[in-house]
Amino acid sequence: MTNTAFGIDIGGSGIKGARVDLDTGEFIGDRLKIATPSPATPDAVAETVAEILRQAEWDGDVGITLPSVVKDQVALSAANIDKSWIGTNVDELFHNHLGGREISVLNDADAAGLAEAAFGDPRARQGAVIFLTFGTGIGSAFLINGELFPNTELGHLEVDGKEAEHRASSAVKEREELSYKKWAKRVSKVLLEYERLFSPQVFLVGGGISREYERWVPLLTNDVTVIPAQLRNRAGIVGAAMAVTQRVAP
């Protein structure tokens, strides 16, 4: 029997889900997507998750990512979702909408990091690795030999008096119309500060801009090796499915 779970990735614009073969990291069947409700309140989002599971005819275990710090299954922040998430017990919320199945809820970057360590570049599960997603902000996940240290928020760490994600996210690149060369200089400054503080063996970079890694990764001047993520937009869903199977519930 296939080692299978269902992963849900909640984003600011869309909520996506799929069955995942946990032996290969591949989707089984089609990925489903429904637009994130507006406002993206806890109950509205949870009901959208329930609708995806109904469409998929899935009544088994489900892992769910949130763009939030999740500690003791309580959301402590809210990025691109309604601020009413802050202080919400997400375990209770989703069980109220999804019934008595096994549920794990975790940060979206943490989920993607887990997936990359399991099914991406082998270096992602060797020693101390910092996974970073460059998008609207900078998401992060700390991995030690493939094991997760949850809820790091490196995008908010100040670098020369400004939060890292306000200096070097891909959204900043677009907004300020920076060339890859100028943007890579900013990313290098951020990575050098992360190196100074955490001494990782490897940086693993994801987010949409990682598809064009050949245009900017070779321009970086930090010392630690930087490698591109492999799973692209599958990572959040795969990591969510892994989390419920491994009982990862920060």
Image (tube, grey):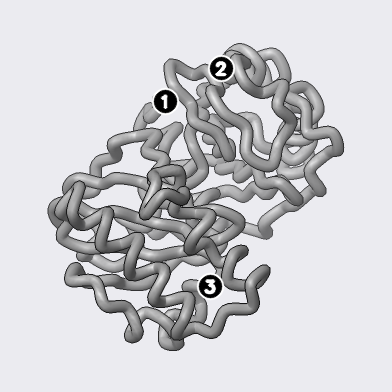
Q: Quadrant of residue 229?
A: bottom left
Q: Is residue 213 above or below residue 162?
A: below
Task: Please state the horizontal and vertical placement of residue 156, each as a whole percent of the image.
Answer: 45, 43
Q: CA distance from mark 1 to mark 3?
A: 29 Å
Image quarter where the C terminus lies is: top left
| Label 1 vs label 3, nearer the camera | 3
For disc 3, the marked residue is 209
Q: What residue is shown with label 1?
A: 249
Kindly indicate the quadrant of the structure image that contains residue 124: bottom left
- Residues at badges 1 and 2 in contact (C-beta under 8 Å)? yes
Q: Which amino acid is tagged 2?
A: Asp
Residue sitting at the far front:
161
Q: How far across and how far down the image is residue 171, in percent?
A: 61, 64
Residue situated furthest right in the rendering: 38
129 shown above or below 242: below
- Is residue 2 visible from the viewing direction of this image? no
Disc 1: CA contacts within 10 A as few (<14), some (14-19) or many (>=20): some
Q: Are marks 1 and 3 in contact (CB under 8 Å)?
A: no
Q: Is residue 174 above or below residue 63?
A: below
Residue 94 as seen in the image, left or right of residue 207? right
* Camera-side residue of 157 and 108: 157
